[in-house]
Amino acid sequence: MTHEAQTVLPRRILLGVTGGIAAYKAADLVRRLREGGAEVQVILTEGAARFVTPMTFQALSGRPVRVGLWDEAAEAAMGHIELARWAELVLVAPASADFLARLAAGMANDLLTTTCLATTAPIAVAPAMNQQMWSAAATQANITTLRQRSVRVLGPGVGSQACGEQGAGRLLEPADIAAQVLSSSADGGLLSGRHIVITAGPTREPIDPVRFLSNRSSGKMGFAVAQAAREAGARVTLISGPVHLPTPLGVERINVETAAQMYAAVHAVMDDCDVYIGAAAVADYTPHCCAENKIKKTSDTLDLHLEKSPDILASVAALSKRPYVVGFAAETTNVEAHALAKLERKKLDLIAANEVGAERAFDRDDNALLLLWSGGRQALGLQSKADLAREFITFIAHRVSARSDGE
Ligand code: PMT
């Protein structure tokens, strides 16, 4: 089990803008970061300055914009070392393929890369480039290197691109980037003062040392819910199966593999939990025992003996001091009927039903939910998981506060 935490919300943000058509969106990002209460100091690379003017960013940030490493007057006032010390977060958006390569290589050949090398602040990058450039082996290797060095990678988004192609590589929307790096509503938000525990992703049930049973969950839904809960001011513990997603800022993350480990991790944080949301696709069955050595191909058929894994959701709902308990229901048929049966059988306060299948819910960037509770239902329409999670969390926050008011 491993822990990761991102608990401090940055208030002094050094925003690096690199050369690409998406550079114009960085102007909106400055505005949103400042609305969120952050001070923003902008560095434009020379490539960025060909797409957008320093004057725009100076007007929006209220600070002189830095471009060159060799600007004597600027270096005398606030040199790159001071900039590096001043920043509580270095955010590079858009981050071009070239910049990512230079950052991964540890180069210091312009003001932005030099400042990145000189800072001890966390670094986040929001890549933006043509989809082929994003999927190129070199870019992916650079991203892996940067992630290993704890650089947060925000996005990229998927969709139509300025070059006319479709695919991954779009800059995330400025509102999403701003929401991921700071939470304007964290203090005094709808869930301020609440501790929310969320599970996400699949579990892996070992068959032998090299094989496991798992499912198609990517963790995207649960991570989006964790981020939305953090944005709403909650203290968030995210207990995740094996996924390839960065931890949302301000969220404490506990990594697990098996259903049994997830069960233990959940119950270890139940003491002060106000809301539990089970978005993980937990294995219902696990191999009776994991073979000590790799199972050999000695016969034409192989029987696996499976036994029920612990039902985490039902066990949380059965606690004597129980939180508000929200389950998910992943169904391929009769979605509402099956979900209602789970709501009752597991004694939940709320269940979020989604239709799953090859083209639905699992590992997609969008989803729709049908919320069901004793005596009510509400549909949340198809939209990005980020937006859906915000609607979902707002709904939960209102139900939780209505319940507290009634106590
Ligand atoms: O991760 P993504 O790719 O973004 O996909 C999102 C999702 C489809 C995984 C998500 O929206 C979702 O539906 N999650 C729940 C998946 C699931 O396991 O559903 P279920 O109907 O089998 O289980 C019902 C509930 O019981 C769930 O809250 C589940 O977390 C919980 N459960 C199930 C088994 C078990 N042993 N313990 C549990 O707590």
Image: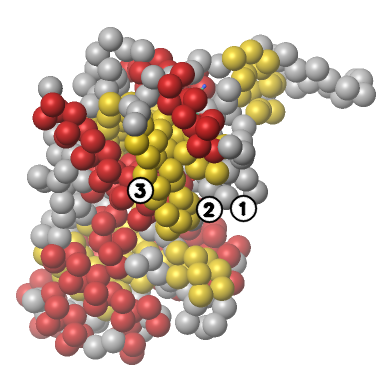
Give the percent coordinates (x, y) of residue 368: 46, 50
What amino acid is found at the position of numbered circle 1 in the picture? Glu
Residues 166 and 58: in front is 166
- Image: 148 above or below 63: above
Crowding at dot 1, Cα within 10 Å, few <14 / some 14-19 / many 20+, comes out as few
Q: Is residue 212 visible?
A: yes
Q: Which residue is drawn at 31% across and 50% down?
A: 391
Residue under label 3, please give it: 389
Residue neighbourhood size for the residue with mark 3, other residues' Cα within 10 Å, grouped as few (<14), some (14–19), many (≥20): many
* Image coords of residue 159 (percent x, y): 50, 70
Q: Which residue is drawn at 47% across and 39% down?
A: 353
- Which mark is on residue 359? 1
Residue underneath mark 2? 364
Per the image, label 2 sits on a secondary structure element best described as loop
Q: What residue type is labelled 2?
A: Arg
Q: Earlier in the sequence, mark 2 or mark 3?
A: 2
Give the Cα distance between marks 2 and 3: 14 Å
Residue at (25, 61) in percent of width and height: 178
Label 2 to label 1: alpha-carbon separation: 8 Å
Label 3 C-beta lies within 8 Å of the nearest ligand 1 atom: no
- Decide which of tag 3 and tag 1 comes sooner along the chain: 1
Quick check: can you spot residue 257? no
